Amino acid sequence: MKLLLLDDDPVRRLQWQERAACQDYDDELFFERDNELRVVRARREQAAKQICAACPVRVECLRFAESGPEVFGVWGGTTQRERAIRRRRRRRAAAVTRP
Ligand code: SF4
């Protein structure tokens, strides 16, 4: 998988992405295809998440995926839908704690 290199700082960029466990895997394992059947998507995402589970930079990857606009695909062991749920929960929690 080729990660998006959005950070212009080469040091910060290399710090975690070069240790990514997905580097030698096909992008198609991490990103949804057009008209992908739900069962196929579930199997593919599960396989991607297994790679993420053993990744030494999983935390950094998830932080990156959640740090800006929504990104597609499996990042940091989460799917796009799971991250959307996490975002909604954070927003709700922030709304509850606001005076
Ligand atoms: S957590 Fe998953 S998507 Fe992120 S770098 Fe590691 S293997 Fe790749």
Image (spheres, rainbow, N blue to C red):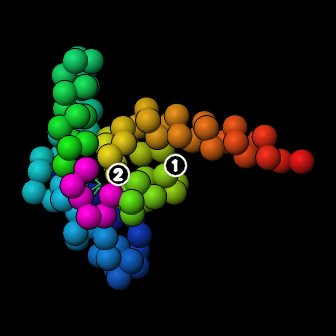
Task: Specify few, some or many for label 1: CA neighbours under 10 Å numbering under 14, 14-19, or 20 or more.
Answer: few
Reading the image, the residue beneath label 1 is: 69
Q: CA distance from mark 1 to mark 2?
A: 15 Å
Quick check: is 55 in the magenta stretch?
A: yes
| In the image, residue 87 above or below residue 36 | below
Q: Image quadrant of residue 5?
A: bottom left
- Residue 36 location, x and y as percent? 23, 22
Q: Toward the viewer: 69 or 57?
A: 57
Quick check: is 94 in the magenta stretch?
A: no
Reading the image, the residue beneath label 2 is: 76
Q: Is residue 2 left or right of residue 7?
A: left
Residue 2 in sight in this render = no
Q: Mark 1 or mark 2: which is in front? A: 2
- Residue 67 location, x and y as percent? 51, 57
Q: Is residue 7 left or right of residue 30?
A: right
Q: Image quadrant of residue 22?
A: bottom left
Residue at 34% of width from left, 80% of height from top?
10
Residue at 27% of width from left, 18% of height from top?
38
Q: Secondary structure at mark 1?
A: loop
What's drawn in magenta, residue-wise?
52-58
| In the image, residue 5 above or below residue 29 | below
- Asked if ligand 1 lies within 8 A of label 1, the reply is no
| In the image, residue 7 above or below residue 81 | below
Task: Specify few, some or many for label 2: CA neighbours under 10 Å numbering under 14, 14-19, or 20 or more.
Answer: many
Residue at 18% of width from left, 59% of height from top?
21
- The amino acid beneath tag 1 is Pro
- Asked if ligand 1 lies within 8 A of label 2, the reply is yes
- The amino acid beneath tag 2 is Gly
Q: Which mark is residue 12?
A: none
Q: Quadrant of ligand 1?
A: bottom left
Residue 44 in sight in this render = yes
